Image (cartoon, rainbow, N blue to C red):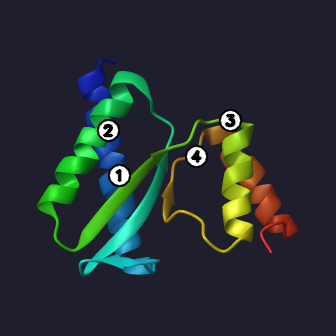
Amino acid sequence: MDAKQTVLILSLVLLLILGTFAFTGKPTESQNGRMVLDLWHPWGGPIGEEFRNFIHRYNQSNDKVQIDPLFTPNDLSANQKFFLSVAGGSPPEITFVDGPQVAEWAARWRAGVHR
């Protein structure tokens, strides 16, 4: 899969996530009348640059929602950062999770670790 295909797939995933959030989430802040969504993503290098360019174009074309991307690697430190943000009451509105992490996070949630 080349970089363009990867960016296209990531873009479609992002649009699906944003579409879902638009009807269920509550923004944490407003900037110039725009809802601001924090997005944590694991992509660096050329794919990360393309992803940030996509987000920039989205922000330029949308006057109601602004996405603030933040690179967070897919590793244990990112998991800790996420759980600390949840415990502190300020998690990102959007984050990307690897398949193996989903099971661990679901188990933690079920065990009440999120409280």
Q: Nearer the viewer, mark 2 or mark 4?
A: 2
> Is mark 3 in CB contact (under 8 Å) with mark 1?
no
**Residues at badges 1 and 2 in contact (C-beta under 8 Å)?**
no
How packed mark 4 is, by other alpha carbons closer than 10 Å (few <14, some 14-19, many 20 or more), is: some
Is the C terminus in the top left, top right, bottom left or bottom right quadrant? bottom right
**x, y (%) of residue 62?**
17, 65
Q: Earlier in the sequence, mark 3 or mark 1?
A: 1
- The residue tagged 3 is 75
Packing grade of label 2 (10 A; few <14, some 14-19, many >=20) is many
Q: Nearer the viewer, residue 31 or 94?
A: 31
Residue 9 quadrant:
top left
The x, y position of residue 67, in whole percent, is 34, 59
**Mark toward the start of the polypeptide (1 vs 4):** 1
Identify the residue under disc 4: 97
Q: Amino acid at mark 2?
A: Phe
Q: Amino acid at mark 3?
A: Asp
Tell me which label, 2 or 4, sits earlier in the chain: 2
Residue where numbered disc 2 is placed: 51
Looking at this view, name the residue that lies furthest to the right: 111
Are there few (<14), some (14-19), or many (20+) residues within 10 Å of tag 3?
A: few
Q: Name the residue tied to disc 1.
A: 14
